[in-house]
Every structure is written in C-alpha cells, then in structure tokens.
Amino acid sequence: MAQNAAKRVLRIGGMSCASCAAAVEKALESVPGVGDAVVNFATEKAVVTYDPSKVSEEALERAVHDAGYDYLGVEDEGAGHTDDFQEKLRISRNRMIWAWALTLPVMAVMVPDMLFGAHLFSMKAMKWIMLIGSAPVVFIVGFPTLKTAWSSVRHRAPTMDVLISLGMLAALSTGVLVFFLPVGNYSAVAAMILAFHLTGRYIEAQARGRASSAIRKLMDLEPEDAVLLVNGVETKVPLSSVKVGDLMLVRPGQRIPTDGRVVHGESSVDESMATGESMPVHKTVGSEVIGASINLDGVLQVEATRVGRDTFLAQVVKLVEEAQGTKVPIQAFADKVTRGFVPVVLVLSSLTFVVWLVSPPFLLGLLERAQTLLPWVNPGASPLTLAILASVSVLVIACPCALGLATPTALVVSSGMGAERGILIRSGEAIQTLRDVKAMVFDKTGTLTYGKPEVTDVINLGTLSEGEALRLTALAEQGSEHPLAQRLFAYAASRLGNVTGQVDEFRSTPGKGVEAVLDGGRRVVVGRPGFLQEKGISGESVQEAVTKVKDLALSGKTVILSAVDGQVALAVAFLDTLKPEAQKVLRALKEMGIEPVMLTGDNERTARAIAEEAGITRFVAELLPEDKVTAIRALQDEFGTVAMVGDGINDAPSLVQANVGIAIGTGTDIAIESSDVTVVRGELSSIVEAVRLSRATFRKIKQNLFWALFYNVVAIPLAVLGLLHPIIAESAMALSSVTVVTNANLLRREKIRFE
Ligand code: ADP
Ligand code: MG
C-alpha cells in the first residue's frame, strides 16, 4: 500500500456540519483499498490515500453518494475556485433572506400578542395564521436541511441537521397541537429557529471563506494568457496552451506566466507572492523565475520549464490543500466527542421531554426562582408546553459544529498565512510539534552558511609543483557533487587555464572525500584528514599537515588535504560565509526557549569558529552523515522534541529522524518529501516565523476547543433544566460556531513577521 499509494483531493458537497465530515470519512475509509481519508469540513474537501490498483474513482464516488453526500469530483488546481465559493455563498445568503422574509411577518403578528397581549386577530385566526405562516419556512426554505437530516438518519450517521430538523418539527407541531390540547403555540419559533440557523450558517460560510482566502488568492495570481515568441513573432495564447520549452516574452509590469529560465534580458522581479520577501530579486540570463511573479523593470525572454500542475504555484497550492486535509493531533479528542455527539443529544432531549412531562416539583421550583431573572421562563405553563420547550432547546443548542470547526479553521488560516510568507507546513501534526520544539539542530553548510565556499588558501605541502598538485586534486574532484569539490574544480580551472588529464577510476565517500586513479596510475586521495589516514597515507605526514594548517581552521576555514601517490601534497582552505541574519535568528530562538545546536562534518576547529561567530554554544563536529542521525537521537533524549533545519538534499535522514524536519532555501523546488516544513526563501528568519506561526495557531486552537467545549458543557444543562427559550438556544448555537471561526480568522492579527 505504502509504495504505490495515490493521494487525491476530492471535493465534497452537502456537508452541513462537522459530524457530516466524520460520516464521509467513515464512508471513504470503508472502501477496500483506501488507507486513509481525512475530510476537512472547513474547506469541504477530502484527502484520500489509496491503492490505485484496488480503488477506482467511481468506488470513491459511490461511497460518498451512499453516505448521502455529493461527490463534486477530484480537485483540479486553478480554475473555477472563486466562482464556486461565491456561488455557494450566494445560495446560502438567499436561503437566509427567504427564511427571514417569511418569518418576520409571523413574528410581527406573534410578538405584540406575546408581549402586550395585543390580539390583532381572534384566537382561532391566530392559530391558523401562525401555522400557515410558519409551515412554509420549515418545509420549503428548510427543505434542504430536512433532506440532509433524513439522509443522514437513513445512513445511521445522524448529523447536526437532525437536531435542527427535530427542533423545528417539534416546535411546529405545537401549532397543530393547540387545536386539540392545552399547549403553548410555538410554531413561529420553528420558523425562527431556521432563520437563526441559516443566519449563523451564512456568517460562518463567509468566515470560512475568509479563512481559506489566502490560498484562493494565490491561485488567482496566475495570468490568463502568455505572449509567446515564435520565430521572433509575438503571439498571445491562453496560459493552458504554453508548453515546456516555449519562449515567453514578459514586459515590465506583467506577471511571468509560468516557471521558467531567463534566456534573454535582465530585470528585477517581485517574488513576494511565493517567498513573502518584499525586496525584488535581480534576474539575468540563466536565472530561474517563478510563474505568477511580477516582472518589474526590464523585458525578459523566458523559456518555460514547468507548466500546469508542475509549476511552483500549483505545487504550493497542492501542498497547502493536502496540509489542510490533515488533522492536528489535539483534534482527536474533539473528533471523538463529535462522533458520539448527536445520538447522545437525541437521547438527552427525549429524557428531558419525559421528565418535564412529569414536571417534578424541584424543577418547577427552580423555574419559579429563575422567573425573576429570566423573563421567558413560565412555570405556569402546561407540562406538555414545558416538556416541548425544554427538549427543543436541548436539540437546538447542542452544537457539535463549534467543536468540529475549532481546529480545522485555525489550520486553514494558518497554512494560508504560512504560504503567503513562503512557509509551507505539511501537516497539522507539524504545527503542533513545532510549537513544542526545545532544541533546533542546524546543519552548518548551506544552512547557517551560504554553502558556497570560496577557495582562500592553497598550500603546497609535498614535492610536486603547486600547479601539478592542484591539477591532480581538481581532476580527482571532478566527479564529485560536493560543493567543496565543485568550487575547487572551478578555482583550479580558472587558475590553470583548464584542468586536463585522464580519470581512470573514481570513488566518492559521502562526508569524507574522494579517491581516484588518474593519468594511468597516479593515485590521488582528497578529503578530510581522517579520510586520508583511512586510505593508508602515513599518519605522521597527515598530522604534520594538520598542524601546518591549524591557524586556517581556527579562523573558521574548512581545510581539506590532498595526497598524491601516498604523499600529502596539498592543503586547500575554503571560507563559507555565515548568513548575515544567523546571529539575530539564533538569539531570537533562544529567547523563545529553543536551544540551537550546530551539526557539521567539518573539523572541530572550523566548527568552533563558525559556532562562536553565530552565537551557538552547542555544536557537534566531524560527523559523518549517518552520525548526524545518531546525534539527533541523543538530542531527542536530552531535550524531547527536536527540530532539524537542513537543505533537504543531503540531510534527508536527519530531517526524518527529527520530530520536525525543516528544509530551507530550495528555490523553486519544494517537493521535498522528507521535510515537515519547507521554507521557500533561503533565509533563516523564516524559521522564527514558522515557530511563531505554529505557536500562535496552537494557541488559537486551544482557545477554540476550550470555548466550544465550555459552551456545550454549560449550555446543554441549562437547556435541560428548562431555563432557555428555544430562540435563545438557537441564537447561542449559531453564535458559538460563528465565534469559533471568527476567532480562527483573528490569527491573521498575530505578529508573525521577524526582521
Ligand atoms: P557538512 O556537514 O558541513 O555539510 P559534509 O558532511 O558534506 O559537511 O562533509 C564533511 C567534510 O568531509 C568536509 O568538511 C570535507 O572535509 C570532507 N569532504 C566531503 N566530501 C568531500 C569532497 N568531495 N572533497 C573533499 N572533501 C570532502
Ligand atoms: Mg551538508
């Protein structure tokens, strides 16, 4: 399953509440071959992981349908999103308006009657007016609610809509009962329940829309068409017909249509949509550009390198959507509560009904005392009236929605905020873990430093001429991808004119060095001193060389040795500069209670010099790639939760071992599987922002969960005791989920930016 798992984002319709999301989840997971399904009610999407050889799209569609919901197809990046959302919002608003338009006249008749005993009509006429006025609201405007409620009952996964529907129907039934029994007439209350319910839903939908607006905005950034240069002739084509290799012309002020490489021209480009960095980036021939970024001042000719789903933007959107489809671990508890919620409330409401029918004296006594405070309480009403009032209140006040929305909306807002700043958080779990991080491990090369070492010193240590030693060393390094090797080769090539010779054998040992047989028999070993010794170069001569270059290492330079035919021949020193923001960032992390630790394969002296410069007190040097994993494990024992910051290419095992792997500065390539967080901009300050974002998000989640729980724990007992009027209950219910979603949106006010 794991090897050939497919992941799809499905759009689901007809979910009215968090308990619906749970039902869809259950349905999808019961399809054989589906590994995992996560439904986010806030975005109305399901992320399904499944084995494509066993599961067809139709099977998924059927499962969703059979559960009583709408399958709206597989998510396609881009097109149609905004319209879709606006359309839904429009429908939601229309329903609300209709509900009020029909309810207000009934209220106009009922309220004066109730408050001032002003009978505008005869008692008999009143009964008919109330019933005829309210029934259409419940049965016509309320039809979709009744329908989904019924379908959820049929699928034995009753949702929120069942509670609202039963509440409405019970209240409406009093309008019929008044003709036969001594009971208060609450049929207008039925209409009001729906009107309030739909109002709450509308505000909530709006707020949910705001929550995911960041990602929608991102998708809308793509320009609609591109200007192609074909044989020097400009042609305007729709973006969808641009292919890899096409030559695009981009004028100042235009958005670059898709990812590409500059082949002609020079300009500054505003990439803030991708990286959050407001400073324009200078682009010349050979520079990579991101689709949808803005060309500011020059004319560029850009060769398209990625189109459609492969573009940077499409990948970001996909990543964020997948992240939004995951769960924050703390939500597990809320999920458990929501799953059992509706049945429990149904039972509770029935019990309330029965108990109030009996009207035990202590409850009546309570009402009498409450009467002075709560004007709507009427202990004089008939037992049946009291029973209906209390049980309807229980039905409509119980709100699994607030619980279900508490975490997902915060996650949606937070991942959108991250994406705007070039911080891509892969999962809800990463957000929760990042907030707990006690130690943060940094790889030295390429993370704390630029990873672009410059050759500063070449010291001839053997009997060969320096030029010859350099040529052989560079030739040996030719096949290595290590940054040191590549710099060394470039350096030698420019100094010697070119590097010629024949490579007969070549072997590279990651984290140590290379060995090669050159020019038909000359054996060359290049790397760290220990590696030379391993390869049989006399320990004494290596030690002697190390002593000679000690001062270089002490000043923070990385020194490698090269031996030719068993004799140490050359020492080359490189200087890799610390990123300028490193000190500030590390200080900020310490202030946040996070201990920075540096890991490196470089030697102890160099490491100490760099660590001191950066302000790091803890570092571990001379590590082989596999030792880094062990070092992280040791730190986990010591600190608990440990994050690892690396470049994501040769640090993959460490990123995986750490509780949170943060890959930094990988340009336009963000598909790094081993990281939990990817930072698009190669700047360390994004890490502080990521931690701040995770902490702020988690705070919001906790607040939301607390309020949602607190609300139900307090409100339901009040309703059971008959202290709430159904209308108050319904408004409180509507308000509770609106509050939770609005609070999640307030996350945007938090200060995340670090400078
Ligand atoms: P870091 O942890 O700083 O990224 P690496 O694990 O990549 O460092 O390498 C550790 C050390 O091994 C380097 O500092 C260098 O001394 C040596 N080394 C690794 N690969 C090579 C190579 N191709 N040529 C020379 N030295 C190398
Ligand atoms: Mg490295």
Image: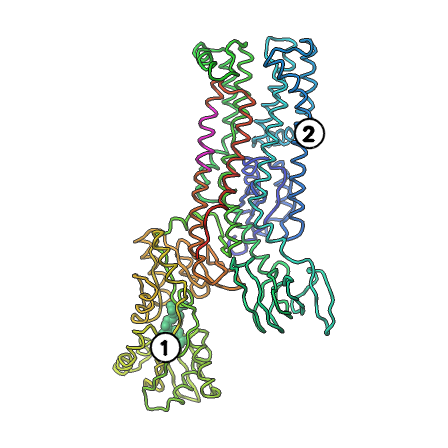
Residue visible at 66% across and 23% down in the picture: 104
Query: Label 2 near label 1: C-beta < 8 Å?
Result: no
Percent position of residue 39, x then y:
55, 43
Q: Which mark is residue 262?
A: none
Residue 416 vs 742, above or below: the answer is below
Check disc 1 and give the amino acid type: Gly
Instruction: Please indicate whether residue 392 sits to the left or right of residue 57 in the image.
Output: left
- Name the colour scheme: rainbow
User: Left or right: 90 with respect to 395?
Assistant: right
Q: Where does the magenta region start and end? A: 704-716
User: Which element is circle 1 on?
Assistant: strand
Q: Would you place residue 332 above or below residue 396 in this image? A: below
Q: Position of residue 386 (x, y in %)?
A: 53, 14
Packing grade of label 2 (10 A; few <14, some 14-19, many >=20) is some
Q: Check mark 1 vs ligand 1: CB closer than 8 Å? yes or no.
A: yes
Tag in front: 1 or 2: 2
**Residue at 51% across, 32% down:** 736
Q: Name the image quarter holding residue 105.
A: top right
Would you name the residue on which mark 2 appears? 98
Q: Quadrant of ligand 2?
A: bottom left
Amino acid type, mark 2: Trp
Most common SS among magenta residues: helix
Judged left or right of residue 543, residue 320 is right
Asked if the beta carbon under badge 2 is closer than 8 A to the nearest atom of ligand 2, the reply is: no
**Residue 511 visible:** no
| Residue 705 part of the magenta segment | yes
Gap between marks 1 and 2 measured at Cα: 78 Å
Can residue 260 be seen from the camera position used here? yes
Q: Position of residue 169 (x, y in %)?
A: 62, 21
Point out the tag, 1 or 2, that comes first from the N-terminus. 2
Confirm whether the magenta stretch covers residue 749.
Answer: no
Could you say which disc has been placed on residue 527 in the image?
Answer: 1
